[in-house]
Protein backbone atom coordinates (compact mmCIF):
# COMPACT_ATOMS: atom_id res chain seq x y z
CA UNK A 1 0.00 0.00 0.00
CA UNK A 2 1.07 3.54 -0.39
CA UNK A 3 1.15 5.09 2.99
CA UNK A 4 0.55 2.33 5.42
CA UNK A 5 3.10 -0.31 5.66
CA UNK A 6 1.13 -1.64 8.65
CA UNK A 7 1.98 -5.30 8.69
CA UNK A 8 -1.15 -7.06 9.83
CA UNK A 9 -0.59 -6.68 13.53
CA UNK A 10 -2.16 -9.92 14.68
CA UNK A 11 1.06 -11.71 13.66
CA UNK A 12 2.37 -11.91 17.23
CA UNK A 13 2.31 -14.42 20.06
CA UNK A 14 -1.46 -14.04 20.16
CA UNK A 15 -1.74 -15.24 16.58
CA UNK A 16 0.59 -18.15 17.22
CA UNK A 17 -1.72 -19.26 20.01
CA UNK A 18 -4.57 -19.41 17.48
CA UNK A 19 -2.80 -21.53 14.86
CA UNK A 20 -5.14 -24.51 15.15
CA UNK A 21 -8.10 -22.24 14.38
CA UNK A 22 -6.19 -20.45 11.64
CA UNK A 23 -5.78 -23.74 9.79
CA UNK A 24 -9.44 -23.62 8.84
CA UNK A 25 -8.64 -20.84 6.35
CA UNK A 26 -5.79 -22.63 4.60
CA UNK A 27 -8.07 -24.40 2.17
CA UNK A 28 -9.07 -20.99 0.81
CA UNK A 29 -5.49 -19.95 0.00
CA UNK A 30 -5.48 -21.88 -3.26
CA UNK A 31 -8.56 -19.96 -4.37
CA UNK A 32 -6.99 -16.72 -3.17
CA UNK A 33 -3.74 -17.36 -5.07
CA UNK A 34 -5.69 -18.25 -8.21
CA UNK A 35 -7.64 -15.00 -8.01
CA UNK A 36 -4.46 -12.97 -7.51
CA UNK A 37 -2.84 -14.70 -10.49
CA UNK A 38 -5.84 -14.12 -12.74
CA UNK A 39 -5.72 -10.40 -11.99
CA UNK A 40 -2.16 -10.40 -13.26
CA UNK A 41 -2.62 -12.39 -16.45
CA UNK A 42 -0.50 -11.09 -19.33
CA UNK A 43 -2.36 -8.76 -21.66
CA UNK A 44 -3.35 -9.92 -25.13
CA UNK A 45 -1.41 -8.55 -28.09
CA UNK A 46 -4.08 -5.91 -28.77
CA UNK A 47 -5.86 -5.45 -25.44
CA UNK A 48 -9.05 -3.52 -25.03
CA UNK A 49 -9.41 -0.61 -22.65
CA UNK A 50 -10.90 -2.85 -19.96
CA UNK A 51 -7.72 -4.90 -19.80
CA UNK A 52 -5.60 -1.74 -19.73
CA UNK A 53 -7.70 -0.58 -16.78
CA UNK A 54 -7.07 -3.96 -15.12
CA UNK A 55 -3.34 -3.30 -15.33
CA UNK A 56 -3.89 0.24 -14.04
CA UNK A 57 -5.57 -1.13 -10.90
CA UNK A 58 -2.46 -3.15 -10.03
CA UNK A 59 -0.93 0.13 -8.84
CA UNK A 60 -0.05 0.60 -5.16
CA UNK A 61 -2.60 2.46 -3.04
CA UNK A 62 -3.16 3.30 0.59
CA UNK A 63 -4.56 0.44 2.73
CA UNK A 64 -5.29 -1.29 -0.59
CA UNK A 65 -8.49 0.77 -0.46
CA UNK A 66 -8.38 1.22 -4.26
CA UNK A 67 -9.80 4.78 -4.12
CA UNK A 68 -10.36 5.12 -7.85
CA UNK A 69 -13.03 5.00 -10.52
CA UNK A 70 -12.42 4.71 -14.27
CA UNK A 71 -14.45 5.95 -17.19
CA UNK A 72 -13.56 5.01 -20.76
CA UNK A 73 -14.67 6.15 -24.21
CA UNK A 74 -12.78 4.90 -27.25
CA UNK A 75 -9.15 5.89 -26.77
CA UNK A 76 -9.91 8.19 -23.85
CA UNK A 77 -9.94 7.34 -20.16
CA UNK A 78 -10.64 9.30 -17.01
CA UNK A 79 -9.49 8.34 -13.53
CA UNK A 80 -11.55 9.85 -10.74
CA UNK A 81 -11.24 9.71 -6.95
CA UNK A 82 -13.67 7.41 -5.18
CA UNK A 83 -14.21 9.42 -2.03
CA UNK A 84 -16.20 6.61 -0.44
CA UNK A 85 -12.84 4.85 -0.05
CA UNK A 86 -11.02 7.68 1.70
CA UNK A 87 -8.92 7.06 4.80
CA UNK A 88 -9.57 10.39 6.55
CA UNK A 89 -7.63 9.71 9.75
CA UNK A 90 -4.28 8.83 8.19
CA UNK A 91 -4.89 10.88 5.04
CA UNK A 92 -7.12 13.85 5.97
CA UNK A 93 -6.33 15.97 2.89
CA UNK A 94 -6.42 13.03 0.43
CA UNK A 95 -2.72 13.38 -0.35
CA UNK A 96 -2.13 9.63 -0.48
CA UNK A 97 -5.34 9.13 -2.43
CA UNK A 98 -4.13 11.34 -5.28
CA UNK A 99 -0.68 9.78 -5.20
CA UNK A 100 -2.51 6.46 -5.73
CA UNK A 101 -4.35 7.89 -8.74
CA UNK A 102 -1.02 8.99 -10.20
CA UNK A 103 0.34 5.46 -9.81
CA UNK A 104 -2.68 4.04 -11.63
CA UNK A 105 -2.37 6.61 -14.42
CA UNK A 106 1.29 5.69 -14.96
CA UNK A 107 0.45 1.98 -15.15
CA UNK A 108 -2.20 2.67 -17.78
CA UNK A 109 0.14 4.82 -19.87
CA UNK A 110 2.98 2.29 -19.72
CA UNK A 111 0.67 -0.61 -20.60
CA UNK A 112 -0.89 1.34 -23.44
CA UNK A 113 2.49 2.23 -24.94
CA UNK A 114 3.60 -1.41 -24.75
CA UNK A 115 0.67 -2.39 -26.99
CA UNK A 116 0.86 0.36 -29.59
CA UNK A 117 -1.41 2.77 -27.70
CA UNK A 118 0.97 5.58 -26.70
CA UNK A 119 -0.74 8.20 -24.59
CA UNK A 120 -0.39 11.22 -22.40
CA UNK A 121 -2.08 12.93 -19.53
CA UNK A 122 -4.34 15.56 -21.07
CA UNK A 123 -5.88 17.24 -18.07
CA UNK A 124 -6.08 17.19 -14.31
CA UNK A 125 -9.02 18.99 -12.73
CA UNK A 126 -7.61 20.33 -9.47
CA UNK A 127 -11.09 20.96 -8.07
CA UNK A 128 -12.48 17.47 -8.53
CA UNK A 129 -9.21 15.68 -9.11
CA UNK A 130 -10.22 14.00 -12.37
CA UNK A 131 -7.31 12.80 -14.52
CA UNK A 132 -7.95 12.64 -18.28
CA UNK A 133 -5.76 10.43 -20.45
CA UNK A 134 -5.68 10.06 -24.21
CA UNK A 135 -4.34 6.97 -25.98
CA UNK A 136 -3.39 7.08 -29.66
CA UNK A 137 -2.27 4.43 -32.15
CA UNK A 138 1.41 3.98 -32.84
CA UNK A 139 4.44 1.74 -32.56
CA UNK A 140 4.50 -0.66 -29.61
CA UNK A 141 7.08 0.27 -26.98
CA UNK A 142 7.34 -2.56 -24.49
CA UNK A 143 9.80 -1.92 -21.68
CA UNK A 144 11.08 -3.58 -18.53
CA UNK A 145 8.71 -1.33 -16.59
CA UNK A 146 5.73 -2.77 -18.46
CA UNK A 147 6.87 -6.34 -17.78
CA UNK A 148 7.14 -5.47 -14.08
CA UNK A 149 3.54 -4.25 -13.66
CA UNK A 150 2.01 -7.65 -12.71
CA UNK A 151 5.05 -8.58 -10.59
CA UNK A 152 5.32 -5.43 -8.47
CA UNK A 153 4.29 -5.65 -4.85
CA UNK A 154 4.80 -3.78 -1.60
CA UNK A 155 6.91 -6.35 0.26
CA UNK A 156 6.44 -5.72 3.97
CA UNK A 157 9.12 -7.96 5.42
CA UNK A 158 12.73 -7.79 6.51
CA UNK A 159 15.15 -7.67 3.58
CA UNK A 160 18.48 -9.48 3.36
CA UNK A 161 20.71 -6.42 3.83
CA UNK A 162 22.73 -6.81 0.62
CA UNK A 163 24.37 -3.61 -0.57
CA UNK A 164 22.93 -1.88 -3.62
CA UNK A 165 25.13 -1.67 -6.75
CA UNK A 166 25.71 1.92 -7.84
CA UNK A 167 24.43 1.13 -11.33
CA UNK A 168 21.08 0.04 -9.86
CA UNK A 169 20.77 3.31 -7.96
CA UNK A 170 21.39 5.20 -11.19
CA UNK A 171 18.69 3.20 -12.96
CA UNK A 172 16.21 3.91 -10.15
CA UNK A 173 16.98 7.62 -10.31
CA UNK A 174 16.62 7.70 -14.08
CA UNK A 175 13.33 5.79 -14.12
CA UNK A 176 11.70 8.02 -11.51
CA UNK A 177 12.39 11.32 -13.27
CA UNK A 178 9.13 13.24 -13.57
CA UNK A 179 8.89 16.97 -14.03
CA UNK A 180 8.56 18.91 -10.75
CA UNK A 181 9.30 15.89 -8.55
CA UNK A 182 12.57 15.34 -6.67
CA UNK A 183 13.76 11.93 -5.46
CA UNK A 184 16.40 11.67 -2.74
CA UNK A 185 18.17 8.34 -2.26
CA UNK A 186 19.57 7.66 1.21
CA UNK A 187 22.01 4.77 1.38
CA UNK A 188 24.54 5.61 4.12
CA UNK A 189 23.92 3.93 7.47
CA UNK A 190 23.93 7.04 9.73
CA UNK A 191 21.21 8.76 7.69
CA UNK A 192 19.15 5.57 7.48
CA UNK A 193 19.37 5.36 11.27
CA UNK A 194 18.19 8.96 11.49
CA UNK A 195 15.18 8.08 9.32
CA UNK A 196 14.50 5.10 11.59
CA UNK A 197 14.42 7.37 14.65
CA UNK A 198 11.79 9.55 12.99
CA UNK A 199 9.76 6.54 11.87
CA UNK A 200 9.68 5.20 15.42
CA UNK A 201 8.70 8.55 16.94
CA UNK A 202 5.85 9.06 14.46
CA UNK A 203 4.74 5.42 14.60
CA UNK A 204 4.41 5.65 18.37
CA UNK A 205 2.14 8.66 17.96
CA UNK A 206 -0.06 6.80 15.51
CA UNK A 207 -0.26 3.62 17.59
CA UNK A 208 -1.45 5.73 20.54
CA UNK A 209 -4.30 7.24 18.47
CA UNK A 210 -7.52 5.18 18.84
CA UNK A 211 -9.00 6.72 15.68
CA UNK A 212 -5.96 5.67 13.66
CA UNK A 213 -6.13 2.13 15.02
CA UNK A 214 -9.86 1.86 14.32
CA UNK A 215 -9.47 3.07 10.74
CA UNK A 216 -6.66 0.61 10.12
CA UNK A 217 -8.72 -2.23 11.59
CA UNK A 218 -11.51 -1.53 9.09
CA UNK A 219 -9.16 -2.36 6.20
CA UNK A 220 -7.56 -5.52 7.60
CA UNK A 221 -8.67 -8.80 6.01
CA UNK A 222 -8.01 -11.62 8.45
CA UNK A 223 -8.38 -14.68 6.20
CA UNK A 224 -8.59 -15.60 2.50
CA UNK A 225 -12.37 -15.96 2.52
CA UNK A 226 -12.78 -12.41 3.82
CA UNK A 227 -10.18 -11.06 1.40
CA UNK A 228 -11.85 -12.76 -1.56
CA UNK A 229 -15.27 -11.46 -0.57
CA UNK A 230 -14.03 -7.88 -0.31
CA UNK A 231 -11.36 -7.81 -3.03
CA UNK A 232 -9.49 -5.09 -1.18
CA UNK A 233 -7.76 -4.32 2.12
CA UNK A 234 -4.70 -5.62 3.92
CA UNK A 235 -4.49 -9.42 3.97
CA UNK A 236 -2.20 -11.03 6.55
CA UNK A 237 -0.08 -13.31 4.30
CA UNK A 238 0.79 -10.36 2.03
CA UNK A 239 2.79 -9.16 5.03
CA UNK A 240 4.08 -12.62 5.94
CA UNK A 241 1.58 -13.25 8.75
CA UNK A 242 -0.79 -16.04 9.67
CA UNK A 243 -4.51 -15.99 8.87
CA UNK A 244 -7.18 -16.22 11.59
CA UNK A 245 -10.98 -16.38 11.57
CA UNK A 246 -12.48 -12.90 11.28
CA UNK A 247 -14.12 -12.80 14.71
CA UNK A 248 -10.85 -13.78 16.40
CA UNK A 249 -8.79 -11.34 14.39
CA UNK A 250 -11.11 -8.45 15.20
CA UNK A 251 -10.94 -9.31 18.88
CA UNK A 252 -7.17 -9.65 19.00
CA UNK A 253 -6.35 -6.71 16.75
CA UNK A 254 -6.74 -3.93 19.29
CA UNK A 255 -5.93 -6.09 22.30
CA UNK A 256 -2.47 -7.02 21.08
CA UNK A 257 -1.56 -3.87 19.15
CA UNK A 258 1.69 -2.76 20.74
CA UNK A 259 3.79 0.25 19.72
CA UNK A 260 7.00 -1.22 21.15
CA UNK A 261 6.64 -4.44 19.15
CA UNK A 262 5.81 -2.49 16.00
CA UNK A 263 8.80 -0.21 16.50
CA UNK A 264 11.09 -3.19 16.96
CA UNK A 265 9.77 -4.62 13.70
CA UNK A 266 10.36 -1.37 11.81
CA UNK A 267 13.88 -1.19 13.18
CA UNK A 268 14.56 -4.64 11.70
CA UNK A 269 12.92 -3.68 8.41
CA UNK A 270 14.80 -0.42 7.94
CA UNK A 271 18.17 -1.75 9.08
CA UNK A 272 17.88 -4.64 6.61
CA UNK A 273 17.11 -2.23 3.75
CA UNK A 274 20.18 -0.81 1.99
CA UNK A 275 18.33 2.20 0.64
CA UNK A 276 15.56 4.68 1.37
CA UNK A 277 13.94 6.92 -1.26
CA UNK A 278 12.14 10.17 -0.42
CA UNK A 279 9.79 11.68 -3.02
CA UNK A 280 9.06 15.42 -2.91
CA UNK A 281 6.76 17.37 -5.22
CA UNK A 282 7.48 21.03 -5.89
CA UNK A 283 4.10 22.02 -4.46
CA UNK A 284 1.53 20.53 -2.10
CA UNK A 285 -1.49 20.23 -4.42
CA UNK A 286 -3.34 17.53 -6.34
CA UNK A 287 -1.42 18.11 -9.55
CA UNK A 288 1.93 17.49 -7.83
CA UNK A 289 0.60 14.58 -5.76
CA UNK A 290 -0.40 12.86 -8.99
CA UNK A 291 3.06 13.61 -10.41
CA UNK A 292 4.63 12.10 -7.28
CA UNK A 293 2.51 8.99 -7.82
CA UNK A 294 3.72 8.67 -11.40
CA UNK A 295 7.34 9.10 -10.30
CA UNK A 296 7.00 6.57 -7.50
CA UNK A 297 5.30 4.03 -9.75
CA UNK A 298 8.15 4.25 -12.26
CA UNK A 299 10.64 3.82 -9.40
CA UNK A 300 8.71 0.81 -8.06
CA UNK A 301 8.50 -0.85 -11.47
CA UNK A 302 12.20 -0.29 -12.15
CA UNK A 303 13.00 -1.73 -8.73
CA UNK A 304 10.88 -4.78 -9.55
CA UNK A 305 12.64 -5.19 -12.90
CA UNK A 306 15.97 -5.20 -11.03
CA UNK A 307 14.81 -7.89 -8.61
CA UNK A 308 14.36 -5.40 -5.77
CA UNK A 309 11.54 -5.13 -3.25
CA UNK A 310 10.10 -1.98 -1.75
CA UNK A 311 7.74 -0.93 1.04
CA UNK A 312 6.47 2.30 2.56
CA UNK A 313 7.72 3.77 5.82
CA UNK A 314 5.58 6.88 5.68
CA UNK A 315 5.05 7.57 9.38
CA UNK A 316 7.27 10.70 9.34
CA UNK A 317 5.09 12.32 6.67
CA UNK A 318 1.71 11.25 8.05
CA UNK A 319 2.02 12.98 11.44
CA UNK A 320 2.03 16.77 10.76
CA UNK A 321 4.56 17.66 13.45
CA UNK A 322 6.84 14.83 12.40
CA UNK A 323 6.54 15.90 8.77
CA UNK A 324 7.78 19.40 9.60
CA UNK A 325 10.72 17.95 11.50
CA UNK A 326 11.48 15.49 8.71
CA UNK A 327 11.51 18.25 6.09
CA UNK A 328 13.95 20.22 8.24
CA UNK A 329 16.16 17.17 8.63
CA UNK A 330 16.20 16.80 4.85
CA UNK A 331 17.39 20.40 4.62
CA UNK A 332 14.14 21.46 2.97
CA UNK A 333 12.20 23.46 5.60
CA UNK A 334 8.76 24.53 4.46
CA UNK A 335 8.52 21.74 1.88
CA UNK A 336 6.14 18.79 2.19
CA UNK A 337 7.86 15.41 1.70
CA UNK A 338 5.40 13.09 -0.06
CA UNK A 339 6.62 9.49 0.25
CA UNK A 340 9.28 7.55 2.14
CA UNK A 341 10.16 4.17 0.62
CA UNK A 342 12.66 1.53 1.70
CA UNK A 343 14.09 -0.86 -0.87
CA UNK A 344 16.31 -3.90 -1.01
CA UNK A 345 16.40 -7.63 -1.71
CA UNK A 346 13.88 -10.15 -0.35
CA UNK A 347 11.70 -13.06 -1.50
CA UNK A 348 8.24 -12.22 -2.80
CA UNK A 349 5.18 -12.54 -0.58
CA UNK A 350 1.65 -13.44 -1.72
CA UNK A 351 0.12 -10.82 -4.00
CA UNK A 352 -2.73 -8.58 -2.89
CA UNK A 353 -6.16 -8.63 -4.52
CA UNK A 354 -8.03 -5.98 -6.48
CA UNK A 355 -11.73 -5.55 -7.15
CA UNK A 356 -13.12 -6.55 -10.53
CA UNK A 357 -12.72 -3.99 -13.30
CA UNK A 358 -16.49 -3.76 -13.63
CA UNK A 359 -16.67 -2.62 -10.00
CA UNK A 360 -14.48 0.43 -10.67
CA UNK A 361 -16.07 1.54 -13.98
CA UNK A 362 -18.54 4.40 -14.20
CA UNK A 363 -20.35 5.74 -17.28
CA UNK A 364 -18.41 8.19 -19.42
CA UNK A 365 -21.10 10.86 -19.13
CA UNK A 366 -20.53 11.18 -15.39
CA UNK A 367 -16.86 12.04 -15.84
CA UNK A 368 -17.48 14.70 -18.51
Image (cartoon, helix red, strand yellow):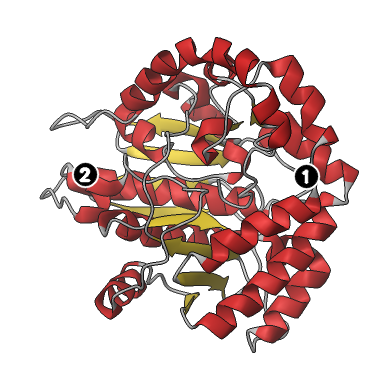
* Residue 212 in view: yes
Q: Secondary structure at mark 2?
A: loop
The picture places residue 254, in percent across and down from the top left corner, at 83, 35
- Closer to the camera, 39 or 312? 312
The picture places residue 166, in percent across and down from the top left corner, at 29, 80
Placement of 297 over or under 68, stated as above or below: below
Neighbourhood count class around disc 1 (C-alpha, 10 Å): few under 14, some 14–19, many 20 upward: few
Q: Nearer the viewer, mark 1 or mark 2?
A: 1
- Closer to the camera, 40 or 290? 40
Residue lying farthest to the bottom in this orientation? 331
- Residue beneath the point at 70% across and 77% down: 326
Which is nearer the N-term, disc 1 or disc 2? 1
Placement of 174 over or under 30, stated as above or below: below
- Residue beneath the point at 26% across and 28% down: 41
Residue 63 tag number = none
Rendered-image quadrant of the N terminus: top right
Q: What residue is disc 1 on? A: 88
Placement of 323 over or under 129, stated as above or below: below
The picture places residue 253, in percent across and down from the top left corner, at 77, 32
Quarter of the image where one finds residue 111: top left
Placement of 239 over or under 223, stated as above or below: below
Q: Secondary structure at mark 1?
A: loop
Q: What residue is disc 2 on? A: 117
In this figure, what is the number of numbered marks?
2
* Residue 288 in view: no
- Closer to the camera, 79 or 304? 304
- Residue beneath the point at 31% across and 60% down: 302
The picture places residue 59, in percent across and down from the top left corner, at 44, 44
- Residue beneath the point at 52% across and 48% down: 156
Amino acid sequence: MIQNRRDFIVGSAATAAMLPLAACGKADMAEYDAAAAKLRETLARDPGMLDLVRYATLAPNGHNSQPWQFSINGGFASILPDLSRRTPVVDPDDHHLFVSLGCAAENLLIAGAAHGRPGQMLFLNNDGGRIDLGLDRGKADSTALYDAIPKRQSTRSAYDGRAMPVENLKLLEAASKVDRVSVLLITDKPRREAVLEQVIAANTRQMDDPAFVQELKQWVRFNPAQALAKGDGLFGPTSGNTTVPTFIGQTLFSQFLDADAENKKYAEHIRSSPGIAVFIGDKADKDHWVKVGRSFQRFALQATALGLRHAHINQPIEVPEARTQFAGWLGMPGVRPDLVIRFGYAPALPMSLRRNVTDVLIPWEISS
